[in-house]
Amino acid sequence: MAQAGFDRRRINGPEESFPPVFDDDDDRRPSSKPRQGRKPSEIRPIFLQPGLITQANGSAYIETEKTKIACAVYGPRQSKNMAYSENGHLNVEVKYAPYACRQRKAPIRDAEDRSIGVAIHQALLSSVRLELLPKSTIDIFIVIIESDGLEGCVAAGSVAASTALADAGIELFGLVVSCAAALVDDEIWLDPTLDEAQYAKGSLVLATMPALETVTSVWQNGQMQTVDVIKCMELCEERCTEMHSVVAQVLLDSQR
Amino acid sequence: MTTSEDADLKAAVFQRLHPRVYLERFVAENVRPDGRQIDAWREISVNVGSISSANGSALVRVGNTTVVCGVKAELAEPELDAPTRGFLVPNLDLPAICSPKFKPGPPTEEAQVLSDRLNEVLVTTIPLESLCIHPGKSVWVLYVDATCINYDGNAFDAALIAMVAALKNTMLPKATYNEDTMRTTCSRKTLSPLQINSLPISMSFGIFDSHVFPDPTSFEEPLLDTSISVVIDDNGKISSVSQIGADVDALLTCTSAARKRHEFLSQRIYL
């Protein structure tokens, strides 16, 4: 239900408009086991391209089937209006395009955008050498062009942001890669789509730096037994290590 | 540093400190700073239909300027004084991601001006009566949102092509209005394309020291004395002309250059 308050800075439509209701909406069945299309531990192929946004210091575009995210890094640049700080600041801003989800999102930034921003910030913070950049800010801007579930966006956004940071030449301790997992009944499905995640009891997004074998962030939602959480983390970590070589190769190829 | 790196650094510093003189040096050799001939246009590439969450979508690149456009269709009640007209709501967003000169926050003046100009042109493309489902009760609202991801000048041309291509790509589900329940239901299986009246293409020029630059880049834009945009529809008729700046002679040159460019583009862009 899109109730746009009159925004004098944009062209406005009618006061109230509703997303279309389909006649077969009640017939849609929840995801059934076994998983459709791929094995539970399989992740979808990733297309990652750095350097597409020429105006930025570094950029990356990531696409995994229905998740399309563009990320640009500006910095290090001067921290305006901020008191002197010995370490640099990392600022992550995420924006959904209005057409990214099934229901149109108004262009106003809301809590969901901010929560993805916070999750990606947490994933990247320990990988950037901020102590080398006093008085500076690194701005990471992420635009979600098409979204296939919140966990998918956080995971793909973290990978894109880390690639963009490397593309910008900012000193890092290591590349951050991230993988999402969902607990459906008793099976763990990696890289869940929006439909799969909706029927999961709980989900987990793990961000790691495989080069240093360290975890940078764990984001868990829903009800999961502790053993399941540990199992998810182990499965995600394996995938992350595979992803890391892909990301490193992509960065190497782009420099040639 | 090798001598070629040294020369690149010197050129980059000169470009930052004296942009006008830098541009004048190129113009004296009849080229533009990005290497094209002084009257050449940049390559345009259009890719439609890649965003499945939108009813229609297009990604357009004009040189480095990249604009993504998505069309979302929603249902609404029509205005009281226009019971058979639907709504077409175009908006261009220039977010902080696309250029260092845009800060995060509400739409800047530039974005608002461009959205307004796009709205004026798009009003001619679709007959709003074709969006009516049931007069006085239920109509379609088409939200046409364009997002610029890389701003290298001439966002207006790129955004217009993106919006029109996205509209051409849009498939609307068949909607039926039930008078008893006063609700509209749509069918996922029957889709139909939009009725399109015209497919406008815009061509923008900048005037610098009485030289006409077609398709200015983001480096050239702040140095221009005058900007002229010519919009031509698919019948070859001029749909709109806008000039910002005081130049008196360039308008005729620009309209004829625009017509020539339109002949080249018209069959290639909106396939």
Image: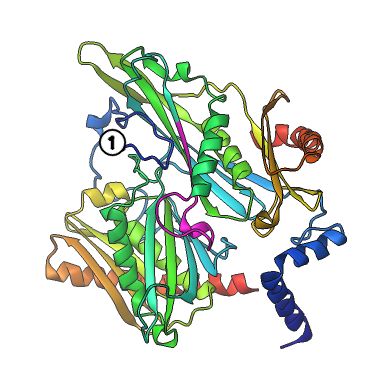
The answer to whether A213 is drawn above or below residue B91 in the figure is below
Image quadrant in which the N terminus of chain B is located? bottom right
User: Residue, x 40% and y 17% (percent of image)?
Assistant: B132
Please state which amino acid type lies under the numbered disc 1. Gln
Q: Nearer the viewer, residue B65 or B246?
A: B246
Q: Does the magenta stretch include residue B100?
A: yes
Residue A230, horizontal then vertical, whole percent = 20, 72
Q: Which residue was labeled with disc 1?
A: A3
Q: What stretch is highlighted in magenta?
A: B89-108
User: Residue, x 28% and y 73% (percent of image)?
Assistant: A217
Lateral position of residue B117 relative to residue B243, left or right: left
Lateral position of residue A7 relative to residue A218, left or right: right
User: Residue, x 60% and y 70% (percent of image)?
Assistant: A254
Quadrant position of residue A249 = bottom right
Q: Which of B20 and B56 is in front in this view?
A: B20
Count of marks, rendered view: 1
Q: Badge 1: how crowded within 10 Å, few (<14), some, or many (20+)?
A: few
Residue A144, horizontal then vertical, whole percent = 41, 53
Q: Magenta residues: mostly which secondary structure?
A: loop
Residue A136, horizontal then vertical, whole percent = 44, 79
Residue B126, horizontal then vertical, whole percent = 53, 23
Res A191 seen here? no
Lateral position of residue B193 relative to residue B206, left or right: left
Res B64 seen here? yes
Chain of residue at mark 1? A
